[in-house]
Image (cartoon, helix red, strand yellow):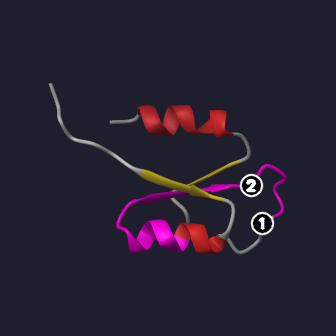
Amino acid sequence: MSTEKKAIMIGDRKLDVAAGHNANIASCLFDPDGIIGDSGDPEIRVTSLLDLIPWLSQS
């Protein structure tokens, strides 16, 4: 049984993505309307939180 824990920062602004990176965790940009231009280079960008399931399921 693994005791390793994982974290991801989910936010809707470039500032949120930067906060995740500053904390040394993955960042997800939540952009339901697909209008955010400058995203801050998140590990994943989603328009629905359900889009995160496959990414989170990866080992």
Q: Is residue 41 left or right of residue 59?
A: right
- The residue that disc 2 covers is 31
Q: Residues within 10 Å of mark 1 (few under 14, many from 20)?
A: few
Marks 2 and 1 sit apart, C-alpha to C-alpha, by: 7 Å
Task: Determine the secondary structure under disc 2.
Answer: loop
Q: Are marks 2 and 1 in contact (CB under 8 Å)?
A: yes
Q: Is residue 32 magenta?
A: yes
Amino acid at dot 1: Ile
Specify start and end residues of the magenta stretch as a single range: 18-35
Residue 20 sits above or below residue 30 on the image: below
Quadrant into which the C terminus falls: top left
Q: Residues within 10 Å of mark 2 (few under 14, many from 20)?
A: some
Q: Is residue 27 above or below residue 5?
A: below
Give the residue type that dot 2 points to. Asp
Up-down: is 38 above or below 34? below
Which residue occupies 41% across, 74% down?
22
Residue 28 in the image: state x and y as whole percent.
56, 55
Residue 30 in view:
yes
Residue, disc 1: 36
Q: Quadrant of the N terminus?
A: top left
Residue 40 makes an appearance in the image: no
Q: Residue at 84% x, 62% y: name it.
A: 35
Q: Nearer the viewer, residue 43 or 24?
A: 24
Residue 45 picture location, percent across and down: 63, 53
Upstream in sequence: badge 2 or badge 1: 2
